[in-house]
Image (cartoon, rainbow, N blue to C red):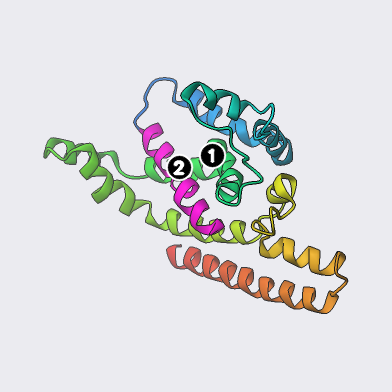
Amino acid sequence: MFFALYLGLTFWIPIVQALLLSDIRKANAFFRFMYQLPTIMPAVAGVLVWKWMYNPDYGLLNYWLQFFGLGPYMWLNDLNITKLAIVLPAVFAGNGISLLLYYSAIKSIPTEILEAAKVDGASPWRRMWTMLLPNIRFIIVIQFIAFMSGVLLAYDNIYVMTQGGPAGSTTVVSMLVVNTAFQQSRFGISGAMSLFMFFVIALLTVLQNKISAEKD
């Protein structure tokens, strides 16, 4: 469930930002700098700010939503929306490093090809689907593999937000490993789960390196 939410709500954002940024001529460097600002803030500090915003009694989100006749919502205590509440900060935080990778890949496409497509009457939408995205497909695949590894290893933001609650609905594999070892003292089972995660991440890393080597 977390993977589906992260994939549907966050993975494509840096791609769209890079596509939009590549068309900006004036103040391009300024916008690239601004996109990196969220990465300066420590991740846990940002999560704590969002946790305060989610507070059902005095949080800003419920305060703003009341003007639209919505809420109040128990963001981190409602089984129906807790997972969404955990993923939502990543939507607004973006990913500055991924943005720069996509932007660099787009800028490496020969401008003559894009200009020729414009002369032939190709719309921006058609140019994006037939020229831009196919030419950065390699970067997208590499970033997707890294994205899967990041989701599998997610821990800090979920622990700070909910500690795996409510009713264990946000307990991910990495948190389950820690809880099994240090709360239940079942070190053997915890070690087995850790080993399984190690092989999964190792497989993804080998796949990523193999794709990179083939590209070179």
Give the residue at mark 1: 94
Residue 3 lies left or right of residue 152; in this view the side is left
The location of residue 58, given as percent across then percent down, is 69, 26
Query: Is-magenta flag for residue 11?
Result: yes
Give, as a three-letter code, the residue at label 1. Gly
Q: Nearer the viewer, residue 89 or 102?
A: 89
Secondary structure at badge 2 equals helix
Residue at 41% from the left image edge and 46% from the top image edge: 105
Image location of residue 51, percent across then percent down:
69, 37
The total number of labels drawn is 2
Asked if residue 49 lies left or right of residue 135, the reply is right
On residue 215, which mark appears?
none
Q: In the image, which disc is placed on residue 13?
A: 2
Amino acid type at image mark 2: Ile
Q: Nearer the viewer, residue 165 or 71?
A: 71
Rendered residue at 55%/50% (across/down): 80
Q: Which range of residues does the magenta coloring cover? A: 1-22
